[in-house]
Image: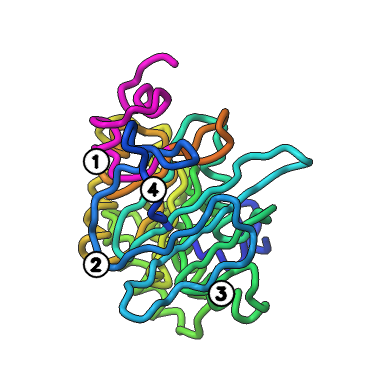
Amino acid sequence: MSASDGRGAEGREGLNRPRQASASDGRGAEGRESLDRPREPGTPDGGGAGRRDAPAAPGRPGAIEPVIKAVDLAVAFNGRTIFKDVTFEVRRGEIFVILGGSGCGKSTLLKALIGLVPLAAGHAWLLGEELAAADDAARRALLRRIGVMWQSGALFGSMTLAENVELPLEEHTDLPRPAREVLARAKLGLVGLGDAAARLPAEISGGMAKRAGIARAMALDPPLLFLDEPSAGLDPITSAGLDKLIRDIARETGTTFVVVTHELQSILAIGDRCIMLDKQAQGMIAEGDPRKLREESTHPTVRAFFRREAA
């Protein structure tokens, strides 16, 4: 589903910065762990945790521009801080996971990145553009270049799967209906639902609904996809199949994925890199390769999460 209108199923209106590591525990000055592996030759920008001046926009000569750059992000509701000082980069073509325990602000961070939740502080760029600073036309153009799959799939119950996938094409392109139908069926085929195009959401399983949600999010061929808890509520076999689908799409299309999840098996199966949020810390406590974090982390909360230990 395109994020350009922020609508759900209820109605149609509707940078990984390098930081100085402590020799004793691998954590930076803010107590975050960084166990990263290099994937691209570009060197991310740095910056102090206390900085509040607007940093320079991404795009240095000779560097690979990140798909997402977030600097010192903070969100608060009614004076209550959800998270603060969140800084990371997402690199082109990777599967980047936002993880953490319940209530730590994972989905809130996703919504803040795409402009559905206002930032209390910080700056975020998507595809080289700062959404919060964009005028209305630029904002709409940018949001048409991203796709979002919400946790439940957010399909319109009165529309077939094909019609759900066609909707962004109808709203944001001038394609004639026959062309939209062909594209919708192609996207459904890509997620293994080519034979279910005429079904209604009530006639399919939860796993199929999530696949249909991914197909709709891909309708406009965005280079960046956000998935909110794609494996939540699925049985292990269905979840593993969805993980494989995400990996296959990323590999075959070069699409960059940002995945919000707390499902450990999915994190280890699909994640190239991750950040971990913590409710008590009100922010990031780790970043890097999730497999390295599992094996090498010295942070007690990170170790407990990846080893399924009681806190």
Instruction: Give the number of the mark in front: 3 or 4.
Output: 4
Which residue, given by chain and number where applicable, does mark 1 sit on? 269
Q: How many angstroms separate mark 4 from mark 1 (CA)?
A: 29 Å
Q: Residues within 10 Å of mark 4 (few under 14, many from 20)?
A: few
First along the sequence among labels 3 and 1: 3
Instruction: Give the number of the mark in front: 1 or 2.
Output: 2
Which residue, given by chain and number where applicable, does mark 3 sit on? 171
Task: Identify the residue at the far top of this view.
Answer: 310
Which residue, given by chain and number where applicable, does mark 2 sit on? 41
First along the sequence among labels 4 and 1: 4
Which residue, given by chain and number where applicable, does mark 4 sit on? 20
Residue drawn at 46 percent across, 84 percent down? 176
Q: In the rendering, at what x and y percent does residue 239 appear? A: 30, 37
Instruction: Label 2, secondary structure: give it.
Output: loop
Q: How many angstroms separate mark 3 from mark 1 (CA)?
A: 35 Å
First along the sequence among labels 2 and 4: 4
Q: How many angstroms separate mark 2 from mark 4 (CA)?
A: 19 Å
Label 4–label 1 contact, CB within 8 A: no
Residue drawn at 34 percent across, 62 percent down? 91
Disc 3 residue type (three-letter): Glu
Task: Identify the residue at the far front of this view.
Answer: 23
Say if the magenta span includes residue 307. Answer: yes
Does any portion of residue 111 appear in the rendered image?
A: yes
Out of 88 and 231, give the one closest to the viewer.
Answer: 88
Instruction: Label 4, secondary structure: give it.
Output: loop
Q: In the rendering, at what x and y percent does residue 90 appear? A: 39, 59
Q: Residues within 10 Å of mark 3 (few under 14, many from 20)?
A: few
Disc 1 residue type (three-letter): Ala
